[in-house]
């Protein structure tokens, strides 16, 4: 156990140092936004990110500043990053709706499977760690109860029910943790940072700034993306803002 404590101290000190370095820059950037110095504020927000510190508030403010600079693609990018950290915050959702109203979206949206809307509502914005910890906790509780069963001559109905409940709930929570982890890592989402024209198998398509796409495959020279209507095409990496 000692090595865990020894490793934990530098980690905590590193996070504290990141926070100490980031907060003055973050506050100064907020003041620049109020003064109307948007580009200078953006530079400072990016400097905060370079310290290694990120938060929903940082992404939210950065996105709002990009929006004031009329850089819709970057605004979409960082609003989506903020949504991953703070979920469906009312102010965030309001701002996202304002940005999306500015995007001339010519694409229809592929319908989601019936289970997808349910999954997004209940688990889409959650972090994997609470489910992982809870799942492991119930699983180890079940293991302890099974071990007690081997050592004890006592058999009772409540003991059996608690054991089965702990095992079932633990495995279910671990499965949810795995699914959330997989859902949050693949595939990648991105916003179009500047209006482009892409070549597909059948035609050339104009893609406005701010459209959200899915990254299908990446290489050093180009990236294969999927548009909201399911059509795929190659684009230059420079025109994408991954979130």
Image (cartoon, rainbow, N blue to C red):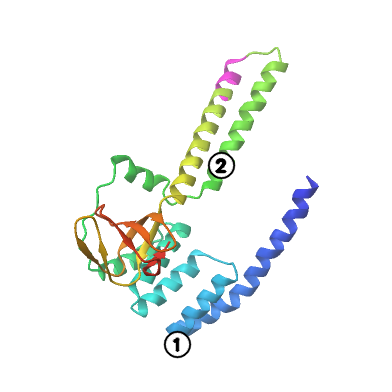
- Residue name at image x 47 percent, y 78 percent: 42
Contact, CB < 8 Å: mark 1 with mark 2? no
**Residue 139: where, in percent of width, then height?**
59, 31
Residue 159 falls within the magenta-colored stretch: yes
- In the image, residue 93 sits, relative to residue 150, either above or below, namely below
For the C terminus, give its image quadrant.
Answer: bottom left
**Residue 239: where, in percent of width, then height?**
36, 69
The label shown at residue 74 is none
Q: Which residue is mark 2?
A: 132
The residue nearer to you, when weighing 211 against 166, is 211
* Residue extent of the magenta highlight: 156-162
**Residue 136: where, in percent of width, then height?**
60, 37
Q: Earlier in the sequence, mark 1 or mark 2?
A: 1
The residue nearer to you, when weighing 200 against 100, is 200
Residue 232 falls within the magenta-colored stretch: no
* Secondary structure mostly seen in the magenta stretch: helix
Helix, strand or loop at mark 1: loop
The residue nearer to you, when weighing 223 against 221, is 221
Task: Give how far apart the Cα atoms at labels 1 and 2 are.
Answer: 44 Å
The label shown at residue 35 is 1
Splitting the image into 4 quarters, where does residue 211 fall? bottom left
- Residue name at image x 40 percent, y 45 percent: 122
Other residues around mark 1 within 10 Å, as few (<14) / some (14–19) / many (≥20): few
Other residues around mark 2 within 10 Å, as few (<14) / some (14–19) / many (≥20): some
- Residue name at image x 53 percent, y 42 percent: 131
Question: In this figure, what is the number of numbered marks?
Answer: 2
Of tags 1 and 2, the one toward the viewer is 2
For the N terminus, give its image quadrant.
Answer: top right
**Residue 193: where, in percent of width, then height?**
35, 70
Splitting the image into 4 quarters, where does residue 104 fall? bottom left
- In the image, residue 120 sits, relative to residue 174, either above or below, namely below
């Amino acid at each position: 156990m000692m090595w865990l404590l020894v490793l934990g101290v530098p980690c905590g000190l590193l996070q504290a140092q990141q926070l100490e370095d980031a907060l003055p820059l973050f506050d100064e950037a907020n003041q620049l936004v109020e003064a109307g110095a948007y580009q200078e504020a953006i530079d400072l927000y990016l400097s905060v990110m370079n310290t290694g510190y990120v938060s929903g508030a940082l992404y939210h403010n950065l996105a709002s500043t990009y929006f004031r600079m009329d850089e819709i693609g970057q605004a979409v990018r960082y609003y989506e990053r903020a949504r991953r950290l703070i979920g469906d915050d009312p102010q965030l959702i309001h701002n996202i709706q304002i940005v999306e109203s500015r995007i001339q979206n010519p694409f229809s949206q592929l319908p989601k499977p019936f289970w997808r809307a349910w999954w997004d509502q209940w688990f889409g914005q959650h972090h994997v760690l609470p489910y992982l910890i809870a799942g492991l906790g119930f699983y180890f509780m079940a293991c302890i109860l099974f071990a007690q069963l081997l050592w004890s001559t006592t058999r009772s109905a409540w003991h059996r029910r608690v054991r089965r409940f702990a095992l079932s709930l633990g495995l279910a929570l671990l499965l949810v943790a795995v699914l959330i982890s997989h859902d949050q890592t693949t595939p990648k989402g991105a916003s179009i940072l500047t209006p482009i024209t892409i070549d597909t198998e059948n035609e050339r398509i104009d893609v406005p700034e701010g459209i959200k796409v899915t990254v299908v495959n990446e290489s050093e020279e180009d990236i294969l993306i999927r548009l909201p209507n399911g059509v795929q095409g190659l684009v230059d990496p420079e025109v994408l803002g991954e979130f």
